[in-house]
Amino acid sequence: MIRLIIIVLIGATLATAPQIEDDWVAVPQPYKEIDLETTPLEIKTNSAIGSGDYVKVLFYSVKSRRAGGFELHFNSTLQYEISECSSYTNFSTNPPADVNKIWRITKTRTSGIRQQIHCNDVEVLNILMSDTTCSSSSWSTFWDRNIRKMYFRFSDSASDFYMSPEGNWVPIRLDIDLEATPLEIKTDSALESEDKANVNFYTSQDVRTGGVYLHFTSTLQYYIDYCITSYTNFPNIPPADVNKMWRISVTRTSGIRLQIHCNDVEVLNILMSNTTCDDITWSAYWNRDIKKIYFDGGENATDYYRPYPVCTGLKTNWTSTMKTTTKFPVDTGTVVEVSCSDDGVTLMGDTKVTCKLGRDFSSLNEPWCSDTLIRRQPDRQTITENKVGTTRTTNNYLGFETGGALLRRQADSQTKLGIKLGQLKCVMEN
């Protein structure tokens, strides 16, 4: 006996149950290892002349003692500064005009301490440091130290990537859309440890937009860059657990609102204004869209971070045909009801889907919208035998009419066969 099972699908396979991945990422160390005397430092920038952007890199010894630094300023002309040696100065050789630049900074000791800077392989500076070439007499105190670490200052707005010792380009700031997806960080610092969690916010073009700092002193305190500019106790005391999960959210539904949760307890909810912020420039920064974050050099409390696991909208390939009344973002595990956008169109598959992450949803039968009527035609069977009579083959023709077109597939009744017809899957068994 032949059984025909018809299953309506949008994809080739059935979706599995929702599964939330453990997607915590270790916070990059703000102090990067480097041996500047054996391996030059390479930095990528794409800032335009006149943008006002800065490259700001500080160097340190293996014992974290200052060992100089280097800055670039994309002013009306490109200028450089060598920490503890010179102030901002025009290059003796103009850097190439390309917006996309790769800078190479080299320190050598073959004949004294020499600094070389290349831009897109063009040497734009070669200086032998001395009491004559440096305006500060203390230059040698710093530059005589062996450089083993570097740190990009949070006010660096031009550096996009640096070359790691392994030869990989590493982003300086981390991509996250804070208004679509709250930021979660993990800490395990104790009160009175004096540890700090410092998260700085930037636009997609690396322009500062604010920041949130936490201080583990005798009480837990917060600081909102360009708004509340001194450490302040939380209005709601955070839970006493040493292991804490912080969630930072920025919304704009009724003004600019910053919310902070600690272990799911709301500890701060502030609507920014000239009354709640003591920095009158707050709106110039917080009105900017937050697209990147950076954990700066004062950071020693944050262990891990991740975008808070939420769904930010329907799948991209759904939005042209389907709609929902749900307001995004929604937490993972939230059930969302969908329907077709156009009248007279039939929703095939599930009407309810479950949020997994981002724009990813799970369902048993993924929904899709169809304006085509699907109905089964009667089976037609043919039987053939060979002349000897020892072999018998039975063929079944399955016909489905879709908008007047007949789709025919043939199946051997001795075989279990799955056939996809557009969004239709037919399974035959004896």
Image (cartoon, helix red, strand yellow):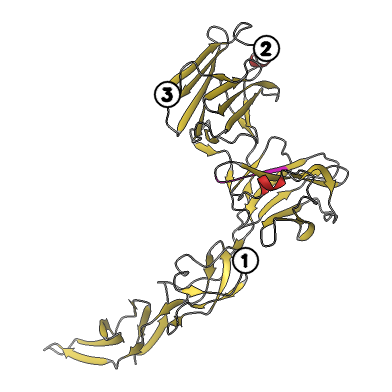
Q: Position of residue 62 (x, y in %)?
A: 67, 24
Numbered disc 3: secondary structure: loop
Q: Quadrant of residue 159?
A: top right
Sort mark 3 into few (<14), some (14-19) or many (20+) by Cα contacts within 10 Å.
Answer: few
Q: Position of residue 179 (x, y in %)?
A: 63, 56
410 vs 128, left or right, is left
Q: Give the range drawn in magenta.
A: 198-204
Image vertical order of residue 26 relative to residue 341, above or below: above
User: First in sequence: mark 3 or mark 2?
Assistant: 3
Numbered disc 1: secondary structure: loop
Does residue 232 show up?
A: yes
Q: Position of residue 427 (x, y in %)?
A: 37, 82
Q: Which mark is residue 332?
A: 1
Q: Which mark is residue 121?
A: 3
Circles 1 and 2 in contact, beta carbons < 8 Å: no
In the current view of this chain or complex, which residue is farthest to the right? 218
